[in-house]
Amino acid sequence: MERLKELHLDGEFRVISDVCLELDDWKVQIDCLLVTDRCCIALESKNISGHLYFNEELDEFYKEENGTETPISNPYFQLMRHILFVKELLRKTHPQMKVTGAAIMTAKSCRIMQKPTHYPIYKLESMVERVTQIYNSSGSEIFSVGELEVVEKLLLENRSAFEYPPLCEYYRINASEIRLGVECPGCGVLGMRRVHTTWHCLACGENDRYAHISAVRDYFRIINKKITNKEFRRFCMIDSKYSASRMLNSMDLIAYGSGPSRYFVEK
């Protein structure tokens, strides 16, 4: 968003960040949407370091770092879903408005070693120039300021609260790198031990019956928006699945499914 402050186009445009849109049961989250007098441009930012490779034949995207290849969700498919959504949203009122987009790699240390040919992916440093090129080459009719405001109003009317993904997903951190254990509310040390019906801190001796509640909140914000009994036991470092089940069921959570596939989410 800071870099987009440098953007100057020949015509009118609006920049809307963190766009969460709903159309019936269809819901998308777009990092940034440019509404211009010629087209709409969806921008998806990806903070991924390392050497990046796009295999168009296999529709794969992966990074290579220190000799290790790590497959990553291909931003092309996310970008296409968002473009299709905006087209559908504008279909009845502005079907003639062109909708396009690009994926922007924001990590300074990334290098695009193998670039796709059928959709745009750029580094942050070239974004302003590339967006300007997309705008100038859109070939679309020019909309009036009034029409632009109508489109902007339509987007805002279908906007809902933006839901940030878990931090591991947002920052591309492997969940295995997160330290496990329940945090002591007294001294902040991880690794409280479950003793009967309470949590005991081996570092300071603090006891707390409900320390796991804060741990589960951390799990939702850091790792995943849903948690199973197995993941709860792994994250909180406890052995008994029966104790884990009692604790999860006693929390103010919504449960789905049954048996091993049962999971919980925040209300």
Image (cartoon, rainbow, N blue to C red):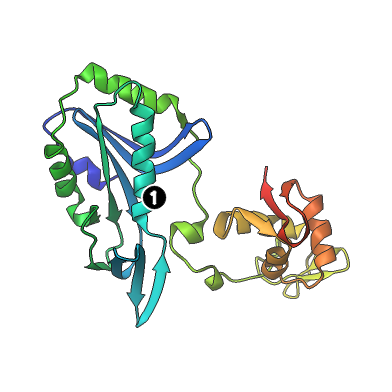
What's the amino acid at mark 1? Gln
**Rendered residue at 35%/48% (across/down):** 79
Report the front residue among 2 and 40.
40
Give the residue at the far bottom of this rendering: 67
Mark 1 crowdedness (10 Å alpha carbons): few <14, some 14-19, many ≥20? some
242 lies above or below 239: above
- In the rendered image, residue 254, in percent from the top left (x then y), is placed at 72, 45
Give the residue at the far right of this rendering: 196
Report the front residue among 93 and 132.
93
- In the rendered image, residue 117, in percent from the top left (x then y), is placed at 20, 58
**Rendered residue at 71%/59% (across/down):** 261
Q: Quadrant location of the N terminus?
A: top left
162 lies above or below 52: above
Give the residue at the far top of this rendering: 146
**Rendered residue at 55%/59% (across/down):** 222
Report the front residue among 161 and 212.
161
Q: Quadrant of residue 108?
A: bottom left
23 lies above or below 267: above
Give the left or right position of residue 236, taking residue 4 as reference: right
Q: Quadrant of residue 106?
A: bottom left
Q: Quadrant location of the C terminus?
A: top right
- In the rendered image, residue 49, in percent from the top left (x then y), is placed at 33, 67
**Does any portion of residue 225 appear in the rendered image?**
yes
Which residue carries the number 1 mark?
Answer: 78
**Does any portion of residue 208 appear in the rendered image?**
no
- In the rendered image, residue 59, in percent from the top left (x then y), is placed at 35, 62
Give the left or right position of residue 73, taking residue 225 as reference: left
89 lies above or below 132: above
Which SS class for mark 1?
Answer: helix
